[in-house]
Image (cartoon, coloured by chain):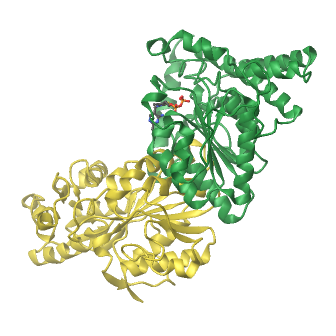
Amino acid sequence: MLPSPQPLGLIDPDGKRTAYRGHPLPPPEVLRELHRRMVIGRRFDRQAGALTRQGRLAVYPSSHGQEACQIGGVLALGPGDWLFPTYRDSVALLTRGIDPVEVLTLLRGSWHSGYDPYRYKTGPQCTPLATNALHAVGLADAARRRGDDVAVLVLMGDGATSEGDAHEAFNFAAVYGAPVVFLIQNNGWAISVPLEKQSKAPTLAHKAVGYGIPGRLVDGNDAAIVYAVVHDALEKARGGGGPTVVEAVTYRIEAHTNADDPTRYRDDEEVAAWRRRDPIDRMEAYLRGNGLIDDAALDGVRAEAEEVAAGVRERMRADDHVAPAELFAHVYAEQTPQLREQAALLAAELAADADVDQEVPA
Amino acid sequence: MIATMAAALNAALRDCLREDPSVIVFGEDVGPLGGVFRVTDGLAREFGEERCFDTPLAESGIVGTAVGMAMYGLRPVVEMQFDAFAYPAFEQIASHVAKMRNRTRGRVALPMVIRIPYGGGIGGVEHHCDSSEAYYTHTAGLRVVTPGTPADAYWMLRQAVASPDPVVFLEPKRRYWARGEVDPAVPGTPMDRAVVRREGTDVTLLAYGPMVQTALEAAEAAAEEGWSAEVIDLRSLSPFDDETVTASVRRTGRAVVVHEAQSFCGYGAEVAARVTERCFHHLHAPVLRVGGFDIPYPPPALEEHHLPGVDRILDAVARLQWEHA
Ligand SMILES: Cc1ncc(C[n+]2csc(CCOP(=O)(O)OP(=O)(O)O)c2C)c(N)n1
């Protein structure tokens, strides 16, 4: 049950195969797909940052540096599986196949969530920390009770593991034998608070043991090991083997969000050191070094990433107009008399504003 | 049949489990024990561990997992053991249960029922007697209902389980042992409507849950003093049945709202404001509130001083400016 003393890895920061043989290296087509998705994800992330500076997004929590965790985790999901993401996981959602504009609905501020959870088997981006872990356990357990072949992956941050709901989720999952995998992206920081102020556990993966859950500690910048370990854990969960906690050690390269100023709490050297452990560079080095990708294929991937970014840029130029009446539409299954009254009030205000606008001489 | 409120709730859960295979019942001690108030008595035996089960001791965990289960198509009916022990679940209730439908533009509904025994009057020690209704009614997206009779307990719980919206179902624990006629064959009034429990012409007493019985007793006493009091059982605290309440108060011209909870920012404040806004020109006196004092719920030896009784309601009725009639 105990995690390994050091994070497991299949590909080292220089793009070399490590000595670890506990998990087979995923096949070349999976490695190429991990790489492709990471390049696209990184480009999308950069585009989202630019949109934030242009005022097109209200806020953006970057995934830069964490691509291996998010993409390794998401690509490991089976066709019937569910994902429960947080606000941090835009790249995971993009990789899930969700329309990038719908991924950004929350962050541009036009609605609280943009995509259909049932269509993508993906919960809405969750902001209250660790609360999504319980939803994941509940859904996983419902699937188990129905006898369905479904596992659930929930994403959470290192800071979120301090929340009471993380504890309750681990415990419920263990007691129920729920088919759920907790993927903790330990990016070192919870806004400005470093991990050592968050926990005295030897590692976050060790916490699992207290609940009777196996803990796995992996190099979160090695997409191959994240994919392999999460894939294994999901398979085990589907087979009735219960939950797993996976801690992926990674780093948040950017500020917490665009609104944050990390110079107040961390050094540039720390960031620089982690840049040298970049998840994309190492996968690229491995693929090149082993003749699994050539310049033409690389150019193709980069061109595809540019296309995705251009598409997002273009489509985000158009305003996402939501009719104000929708404010009252989804509070209950049927509108209450009180909400009908309030909707009428707002409609009257808007009609009056429109009249005033028309009176203004052109 | 004549049943206690607890037995009526038990019958409702049994019928829900029987009729809808997606219904599951869980919480603390609800399995073999049948709940500390025996509301789930016999359900685990009859429907099995998969449909009625004990959870680990964690209220946020109970409600949070219910969210995921409801997303997957189950209809969870969860029990919070006591009012004040539901507070750990408040984040899940306020941030997810209430908001999921709205957040997802109607795509994800969370049909679930959160049953909470509430209120005092049973000699309970601290944390066992809170009237926590206003926390929930202040949260848009929740339906909050509370039965005052065994018949309502049965039918409102049936309707709550069938509702497409999440329902906070507040059970007046001091009335668990009150008896009344329950007919599972005759559907009750829709749970979102208030009902007139006693007709009257001079003043409307607005009560709910544990105070319905008290208000009826007060109306009886008021009759002896020469006041004809109408008693409305609000039943649905959110949404509020303005129609029934407004019609009554416009007729009587006077209203008193009664509850156990602290009065300050209590549910009665909302009722008084709404009634005033809608009935101002029909009112002969300000709407008065009769509630608990603005104190943490008192110890058992002192609770009788805190809980509104017939006398305190009558005193309020007496203050309704009858000299201007
Ligand atoms: C319950 C709760 N408390 C506080 C916050 C505010 N908040 C948002 S993100 C964050 C830091 C979370 O850190 P971590 O879990 O490590 O995830 P990261 O943002 O690093 O991905 C905080 C404190 C919140 N969203 N939810």
Place of residue B177 in the rendered image (x, y in percent of width and height, measured from the top left): 31, 80
Work out whether residue A324 or residue B157 is closer to the camera in this orientation and state it. B157
Work out whether residue A107 or residue A327 is closer to the camera in this orientation and state it. A107
Q: Is residue A291 above or below residue B137?
A: above
Image position of B230 (left or right of B87): left
Q: Is residue A234 above or below residue A286?
A: below
Place of residue B267 in the rendered image (x, y in percent of width and height, measured from the top left): 29, 54
Q: Quadrant of the C terminus of chain A?
A: top right
Image position of B226 (left or right of B184): left
Q: How many marks?
A: 0
Farthest bottom residue in view: B1
Image position of A285 (left or right of A319): right
Q: Residue at x 69, y 65 (%)?
A: A146
Write down the colour of chain A. Answer: green
Place of residue B156 in the rendered image (x, y in percent of width and height, measured from the top left): 45, 70
Q: Quadrant of residue B325?
A: bottom left
Q: Residue at x 76, y 32 (%)?
A: A224
Q: Residue at x 75, y 34 (%)?
A: A20
Q: Is residue B95 visible?
A: yes
Q: Quadrant of residue A305?
A: top right
Place of residue B64 in the rendered image (x, y in percent of width and height, measured from the top left): 51, 52
Q: Residue at x 76, y 39 (%)?
A: A228
Write down the colour of chain B. Answer: yellow
Q: Is residue B189 visible?
A: no
